[in-house]
Amino acid sequence: MAKSYTLHDLPQEERPRERLRQVGVDNLSLQELLALIIERGNRRQNVLQLAQNVLSYFGNLKKVKEASLEELKQVNGIGEATACKLKAALKLGEKASGSNTNHGQKISKAEDVYVLLKSDLTNKKREHFKLLSLDTRNQLISIDNISIGTLNSSLAHPREIFKTAIANNAALVILVHNHPSGDPTPSDDDKKLTQRIKQAGEILGIELRDHVVIGSEGFVSLMA
């Protein structure tokens, strides 16, 4: 059976775990951090080489984060289990960075939504649909991804939106999606969806506070 290279097959001074202990996590390279997640290489490459292959294949960490499981598995040496570990680790990092700064933040107007999400949404190549769940004091409970659409349309259904809102015990919700074209002008479909969600929310007792469309040219509130 072919040998699979692990972290322990590296010289001790090159092992990411030893390096982390010695110099701290802030001083590790992206390659070393990925190697700690991947843990195991294959018969042709050690784990550091495999980590570098992942970075080289996608070009940067942002694209690794955005890659699907199938796309990650296109890298030689990355199987289903490792692809899942990478997705989970990068998502945890995203949630950790957002939870401390966003949870409890007061959202009073559409501009607050834009400031909160513009860096995440303005450079996306497809439409991303997000839901902000708020409590009765307009404080943020959670930001959830509802769906990812095509180049020019987002896919969102009231069922998924309110399933998430109910799970978050939300009193109010704000819909947010981006326009990859850069122009935040709402489409007719955007307006129709807003009305559907507003009506569904009235039945369920969860108020739709706003629907904000974000583009590189700014933002538009459909309920201003």
Image: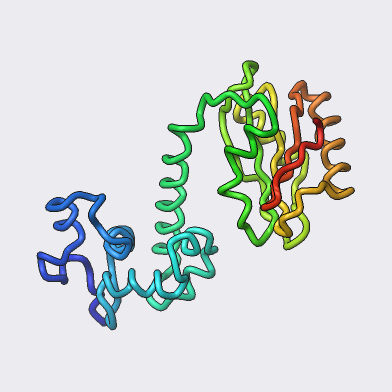
Q: Can residue 145 be seen in this view?
A: yes
Q: Could you tell me which residue is drawn at 50 percent across and 29 percent down?
A: 103
- 96 relative position to 42: left or right: right
| Residue 78 spot, x, y in % from top left | 40, 71
Asked which quadrant contains residue 162, the reply is: top right
Residue in the image at 28% along x and 61% along y: 29
79, 36: nearer the viewer: 36
The x and y percentages for residue 206 are: 74, 24
Q: Which of the pair 2/175 is nearer the observer?
A: 175
Query: Along the horizontal axis of the image, is 108 left or right of 52?
Result: right
Expressed as whole percent of the image width and height from the top left, the position of residue 5 reads 23, 73
* Quarter that holds the C terminus: top right
Measured as percent of width and height from the top left, residue 80 is found at: 45, 66
| In the rendered image, the vertical position of residue 139 relative to residue 45, given as above or below | above
Q: Residue at point 86% right, 42% down?
A: 191
Residue at image coords 44%, 66%: 60
Query: In the rendered view of the protein, which quadrant contains the N terminus?
Result: bottom left
Nearer to us in this view, 43 or 52 = 52
Looking at this view, name the residue that lies furthest to the top. 137
